[in-house]
């Protein structure tokens, strides 16, 4: 009886925690249907009647779907580059023993501790010298270097990859790059998917670098476009439109999370199962 009561209390706490996490999302959706004046003067979880008005305000400032498309053109390839090349680098650091291996690994750790904002001026000078300002290339290509992802995947691959598989592949005459794609990559997929979620969210929500590098309004990403609402003369009146834009911008993130969630769950459970 005592065990059942304890279990019931645990489940009740988890339900309360889950509801608490969902309230901000619910509030965001509700405020997307209310006017800016209503949001500023009252708090409620009951939807309003200003959805169409907010929709019209958003499109009076920018094309919402164009902003989403621009963000996708950056987030998708950047996430792919981060996942693939980080997995390749982590595999090399975890499996091969070569001179300078520890130096490279410790260098990666050092770069993890350096805020990206410190190199922003030098990065802009480099992009300007290469004549790539107002281009998506400097927003996508640097994703190849992701120290945090490399560190995570290196630790992950060391815990899940049996070296006997690689030895068997070499005995059968498989090439190293072929073993990586056919043996290692499928085993690393849970860890890669976990980091891909974070990478996609980071690239989707990127604001500072796109704001500095992009000059053409039709190339602006969604976060940059949203600032036009915040920088308007009547900020209070645009509160509902801002909430609507944010609510719609969350949809691709939720889709990506739902798609990769099974890999995240398998990644968590893999560490708790022993042969």
Image (cartoon, rainbow, N blue to C red):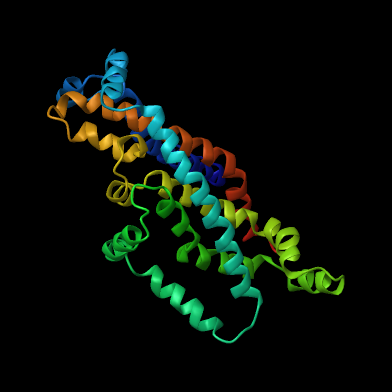
Give residue 46's position: percent from left, percent from top: 31, 18
Which residue is at a point 45% across and 45% down the rendered structure image?
74
Relative vertical location of residue 212 with respect to residue 39 in this rendering, above or below: below
User: Which quadrant of the figure contains the N terminus?
Assistant: top right
- Residue lying farthest right? 172
Left or right: residue 188 versus residue 228 is right
Instruction: Tell me which corner region of the image, top left, top right, bottom left or bottom right, holds residue 220.
Output: top left
Towards the viewer: 134 or 64: 134
**100 relative position to 48: left or right:** right
Q: Nearer the viewer, residue 273 or 113?
A: 113
Classify residue 86 by image quadrant.
bottom right
> Residue 43: percent from the left, percent from the top?
22, 25
Looking at the image, which residue sits at the far bottom?
Answer: 99
Horizontal and vertical percent position of residue 213 = 31, 50
At a point 58% along the width and 44% down the height, the residue shown is 260
For the view shown, which residue lies furthest in the left direction? 233
Q: Which residue lies at the image location 28% right of the left edge and 20% below the top edge?
A: 54
Q: Position of residue 164 (x, y in %)?
A: 78, 73
- Write down the quadrant of residue 57 in the picture: top left
> Which of the pair 168/161 is nearer the observer?
168
Q: Could one spot residue 147 in this view of the protein?
A: yes
In what quadrant of the picture does the C terminus appear? bottom right
Query: Does residue 48 appear to the left or right of 139 in the view shown?
Result: left
- Residue 46 shows in the view: no
In this rendering, the answer to whether 57 lies above or below 66 is above
Say how many tags the image has: 0
Q: Nearer the viewer, residue 49 or 112?
A: 112
């Amino acid at each position: 009886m005592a065990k059942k009561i304890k279990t019931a209390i645990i489940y009740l706490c988890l339900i309360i925690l889950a509801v608490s996490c969902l309230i901000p999302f619910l509030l965001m959706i509700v405020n997307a249907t209310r006017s800016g004046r209503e949001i500023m003067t009252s708090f409620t979880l009951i939807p309003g009647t200003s959805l169409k008005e907010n929709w019209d305000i958003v499109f009076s400032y920018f094309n919402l779907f164009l902003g989403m498309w621009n963000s996708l053109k950056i987030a998708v390839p950047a996430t792919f580059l981060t996942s693939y090349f980080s997995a390749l680098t982590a595999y090399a650091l975890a499996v091969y023993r070569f001179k300078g291996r520890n130096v490279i690994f410790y260098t990666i750790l050092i770069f993890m501790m350096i805020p990206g904002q410190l190199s922003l001026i030098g990065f802009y000078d480099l992009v300007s010298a290469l004549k790539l300002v107002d281009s998506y290339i400097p927003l996508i290509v640097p994703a190849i270097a992701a120290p945090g992802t490399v560190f995570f995947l290196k630790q992950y691959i060391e815990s899940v990859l049996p070296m006997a598989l690689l030895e068997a592949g070499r005995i059968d005459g498989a090439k190293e790059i072929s073993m990586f794609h056919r043996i290692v990559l499928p085993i690393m997929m849970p860890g890669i998917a976990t980091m891909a979620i974070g990478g996609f969210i980071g690239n989707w929500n990127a604001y500072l670098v796109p704001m500095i590098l992009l000059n053409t309004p039709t190339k602006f990403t969604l976060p940059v476009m949203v600032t036009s609402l915040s920088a308007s003369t009547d900020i209070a009146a645009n509160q509902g439109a801002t909430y609507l834009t944010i609510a719609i911008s969350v949809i691709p993130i939720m889709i990506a999370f739902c798609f990769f969630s099974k890999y995240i769950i398998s990644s968590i459970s893999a560490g708790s199962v022993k042969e």
